[in-house]
Image: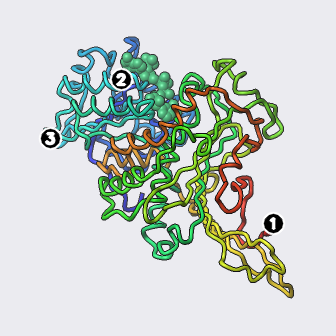
Amino acid sequence: MNGIPQADPCNIVIFGASGDLTRRKLLPALARMRGWNLISPDSRIIGIMRDQAWQLDAWRDYVHESLQEFHAETINDPASWESISAMLELTIGDLTEPSMYQHLRETLKTTNGKANTLFYLAIPPQWYETAVSNLHKSGLLDESDGFRRIVIEKPFGNDLDSACELNRTFREYVKESQIYRIDHYLGKEGVQNLMVFRFANTVFEPLWNRNYIDHVQISVSESIGVEYRAGYYEKSGALMDMIQSHLIQVMTLVAMEAPVSLDGNAVRDEKVKVLKSVRPIPSDQVDQFAVRAQYAGGTIAGKRVPAYRDEPDVNPSSGTETFAALKLYIDNWRWQDVPFLLRTGKRLPDRVSEIAIRFKKPPKNLFSQVEEHLPQNELIFRLHPEEGMIFLLNAKLPGLNDQLRKLALDAPYAVTGSDSPEAYETLLHDALLGQTALFSRADEVEESWRIVAPVMQAWKQHSSIRFYEAGSWDIPDMENMMDGCIGCWRDLSTTYKHGYTSTS
Ligand SMILES: NC(=O)c1ccc[n+]([C@@H]2O[C@H](COP(=O)([O-])OP(=O)(O)OC[C@H]3O[C@@H](n4cnc5c(N)ncnc54)[C@H](OP(=O)(O)O)[C@@H]3O)[C@@H](O)[C@H]2O)c1
């Protein structure tokens, strides 16, 4: 990739090498990074397997099969496969056993006097502490001969107390600068582009405040159901799975002040200021600020789909929410009284992710004869499908008439033929380079748990849940959240082509 630096040689150690995340995300990401020459051929990919039956050949076959399924380009090109295959190493042992760490130490490769190592914890969260304390005890986190970094997957804790406790525990063994908490949403091109649009252009800044913006809508809608993740999802639900992490992170990028630099701590300092300014949701008024619901059976793309409670491994009387929405206020000079509306759900009609900035109306409608209600201007950062930016303006329809139409300025990010990285490639590469801006710091994680804590508490106390039909946007009480905002929730099924569309 043009101008993108290759990371120094590194031992990439994967705890949970036989797991789903490794197979579907990490191995394809590493193969693509190697293909782009972002990883040095002197690096190692060391899988940790606890089953004694594993051999190096079997690990190579496993990687081959995973890539065949999720990134066949590497397999179809013998030189690419050879280059990845030569990097593979294996360490056998259980992460609870000190002897495993001794074997691991013997596998680490030193290049140019350095044994740089990235430990990727792709393991169930209950094992994070065991793995980190054992790495510490075995001296594997000592940075005297190269960096030692730990990548941790979400969820980081399952409420405010557990996240604080995990942070406290980690501080005993490792410096904050060595921890890379992944939120893969921050690795998405569209999300990174938000920072560029805001801080590499001057045109948005004068408008980017309570004087011009009525409200912000951040939406992530999925058409799939819980699929094979019921074991995890039953304990989390949409609020914890999506809003506490991804959507609140995206909100901070919309709302933050310009950092003094792109240094990781400078960016995260600004994001934390936003989180600390979020008005606490009063525990006795949660219903005014939060909505939850669960999908019943319905039809999506002409196919009947079951209710959440009828999905495999779901409790038939489950109270888990598959849709959640929050209305947040950021109490500072820029955003005072501007609602930030966050919504996400499964089994909705379309798979769409976007950030929509809705502007205020003109002070007087000079065109009321032809358009009684002028549509508001909207700036939409689309994350899926087709990452890009759309600006909705009002314009005169060309020709001998006085009609108005919405003019959609649609700027897709992707250039035809370009090869955009996936989120995991961006994040793994940043972790190898020691760039921390796209990873969550301890205080960020704690603050976002603080924001959702009153809602979690209230929903735990009142477990009754309402339902929506799969494939519909008819979510009980969702429209009530628009009180005090101009217009309705955006219709996510509308696609805009560059040019004129009807204002209605
Ligand atoms: N999968 C995803 O798409 C996804 C997305 C976001 C976040 N995450 C997070 O990523 C992490 C891994 O998820 P996953 O879906 O890959 O889980 P998974 O498929 O259940 O895999 C768990 C891995 O951990 C290993 N493991 C468990 N206990 C171990 C021990 N005592 N010693 C050594 N290895 C042990 C397992 O080895 P065995 O094969 O020997 O059991 C397996 O390789 C979780 O924290 C999850 O929340 C996953």
Query: In the current view of this chain or complex, which residue is farthest to the bottom?
Result: 400
Disc nearer the start of the sequence (3/2):
2
Q: What element does badge 2 sit on?
A: strand
- Residue sitting at the far top: 52
Query: Callout 3, which amino acid?
Result: Gly
Q: Please say whether residue 338 is visible from this viewpoint.
A: yes
Disc marking residue 48: 2
Q: State how far apart marks 3 and 1 are (Cα).
A: 67 Å
Instruction: Give percent across and percent down for residue 299.
Output: 81, 36
Q: Is mark 2 within 8 Å of ligand 1?
A: yes
As drawn, the label of residue 504 is 1
Looking at the image, do the residues carrying marks 1 and 2 touch, with CB atoms under 8 Å apart? no
Q: For the point 32% across and 54% down, which residue is it?
A: 269
Residue 299 falls left or right of residue 161: right
Which residue is at 34% across, 62% downward?
Answer: 259
| Observer-nearest of 5 and 290 | 290
Q: Which image quadrant for residue 482?
A: bottom right
Q: What amino acid is labelled 2 in the image?
A: Ile
Instruction: Determine whether the residue tagged by mark 1 lies in a helix, strand or loop.
Output: loop
Amino acid type at image mark 1: Ser
Q: Is residue 245 left or right of residue 406?
A: left
- The residue singled out by tag 3 in the image is 113
Residue 55 visible in the snapshot = no
**Distance between the Cα atoms at labels 3 and 2?**
24 Å
State ligand 1's quadrant: top left
- Residue extending farthest to the front is 284
SS under mark 3: loop
Q: Which is nearer the eye, 388 or 471?
A: 471
> Nearer the N terminus, badge 1 or badge 2?
2
Q: Position of residue 502 (x, y in %)?
A: 80, 69
Percent x, y for residue 146? 18, 41
